[in-house]
Amino acid sequence: MAGGAFSVEKGGKEFRGKFTGYVLLSCILAASGGLMFGYDVGISGGVTSMDDFLGKFFPVVLAKKRRATATESSYCKYDNQGLQAFTSSLYIAGLVATFAASFVTRRFGRKPSMLTAGVFFLVGVVFNAAAMNLAMLIIGRIMLGCGVGFANQAVPLYLSEIAPTRFRGGLNILFQLNVTIGILFANLVNYGTQRIHPWGWRLSLGLAGIPASLLAVGSLLLCETANSLIERGHLERGKAVLKKIRGTDDVDEEFEEMVEVSRIAKEIKHPFRNIIKREHRPQLVIAISLQVFQQFTGINAIMFYAPVLFQTLGFKNDASLYSAVITGAVNVLSTVVSILSVDKFGRRALLLEAGFQMFIPQVLIAILLATGLHGGKQLSHPSAIIVVLMICLFVSGFAWSWGPLGWLIPSEIFPLEIRSAGQSITVCSNLFFTFVIAQSFLSMLCHFKYGIFLFFAGFVVIMTIFVYFLVPETKGIPIEEMVFVWRKHWLWKRFVPASDAKDVILEVAAKHPDPDKDQQFNGIKHQNGLPQSY
Ligand code: BGC
């Protein structure tokens, strides 16, 4: 497809553009940003189940692990705040860094933010791979977290600005696909390095240097986005970049629109104050709830701690890492299913179906563990296999629903003037609840035992009911017409004003799509201070 010209649609308008080398490079960049995040998510579980690693940094846990057999008491063998802090410190650092990143991204551009992410990642990788003590290990994780904060804020924004509009939705899920590939890659690396004694874990942590360098070097090579240059007043440079990335000189219309959009965006002086207004309540409630629920599906209990979890169930080292590889592969494949079906079946259908698909395995696992690990018994071989199969069923349900949609839906429901503030709130809430799960899962497993799966199953029921009643379908609805979705909803219509200037314009425009009318509506939009793409 590279080099082929096509028309791209932007807010109902067509712009000529090519799928140029820059766009291709931006995809590679997305790959490295997403891969890096996924690698960090996936690597910690395998590393924390390696005896060499535990012996060096967490001797208490190693001693406990050696004492415990796969009996009831083994639920607690990994319950250690320090061990959980190793995993969770990354997410709390990421959360804080998101705020700094949002400032740098706006003030200095997308490139500096991505470069900062790459540098943080590289420093973090060095600290981790060379760690001599727990402090170095945690500092390394905090550095990686800062990298995640900067990358997750700037890379998706960079992509959505550089890619022709037709590819924006796809690229959004592509980012998630790369996260899952990063997790799988980390599981495979752990599977290989656990045989290397005593420094295999160093290799696991050090190999994160590959995606980190890709991101750092990539951000030096790529150009700043036209949107960011225009936003910061460099109009001529912005136009030159636009010509370069679109591969044509015919960019005047798109350029004018960008200037107009940036003018409107600048008029919104306090986007965060704006976003808490009553009329934006539906979007805010949905975006934050999706993050809470995404994490309370229990997915990261598996992504972070799968090898540890499998060992807790009585699997040997090898088998537990092997099983983590299987679940990682299921995660990747099911995300592909999501990419292929999200615009066909819609968001609601996938989320509702996944509700059943996640609930049933969790309850079955709880029953198997309650009966199988009871009274000092080992989990039988057939039961252990069923548990792995159930985990795969659960992961695939998540990966074609809550995984990508938890990110996609918030990115498409916020109106232009508060979209970037909405994105920051989404990323922050996600990282916060990811932190909560990372820091508490092993302790919860120790105290709730098999009941932990019933706990998550309970949340799955609540979130499925939430989707059924409160999340409207957004499939195929242009962002500029999203307001009707709220206006038609039984509850959200109470929050969205019945009819204001924007609404009337949009309602009429939607009913009369002929070109003459479009001209008139564009005029009205202009008078109302709305961009043509509104
Ligand atoms: C979530 C991550 C999770 C990943 C698993 C993402 O959507 O935000 O927390 O680790 O999916 O694939």
Image (tube, rainbow, N blue to C red):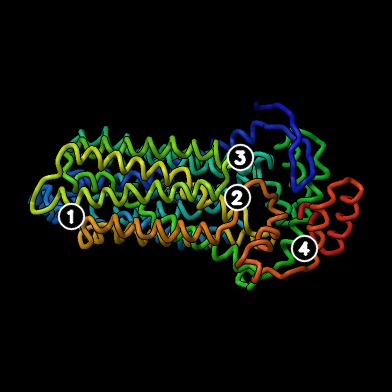
| Residue type of the residue flagged with mark 3 | Leu
- Label whose residue precedes the other's in the sequence (4 or 2): 2
What residue did someone put label 3 on?
222
Measure the C-alpha gap from mark 2 to mark 1. 42 Å
In this rendering, the label closer to the viewer, 4 or 2: 4
Measure the C-alpha gap from mark 2 to mark 3. 14 Å
Measured as percent of width and height from the top left, residue 23 is found at 64, 36
| Residue type of the residue flagged with mark 4 | Asp
> In the picture, which quadrant includes the C terminus?
bottom right
All told, the count of numbered labels is: 4
Q: Is residue 446 left or right of residue 417?
A: left
Residue at 57 percent across and 37 percent down: it is 27
| Residue type of the residue flagged with mark 1 | Tyr
Q: Residue 157 — which label?
A: 2
- Where is 492 relative to 339, above or below? below
Task: Evaluate whether residue 494 shows in this view.
Answer: yes
Q: Is residue 200 left or right of residue 409?
A: left
What SS does tag 3 mark?
loop
C-beta proximity under 8 Å, tags 4 and 3: no
What residue did someone put label 4 on?
503
> In the picture, which quadrant includes the N terminus?
top right
Measured as percent of width and height from the top left, residue 448 is found at 23, 61
What residue did someone put label 1 on?
75
Classify 10 Å Cα crowding around label 4: few (below 14), some (14-19), many (20 and above).
some
| Residue type of the residue flagged with mark 2 | Leu
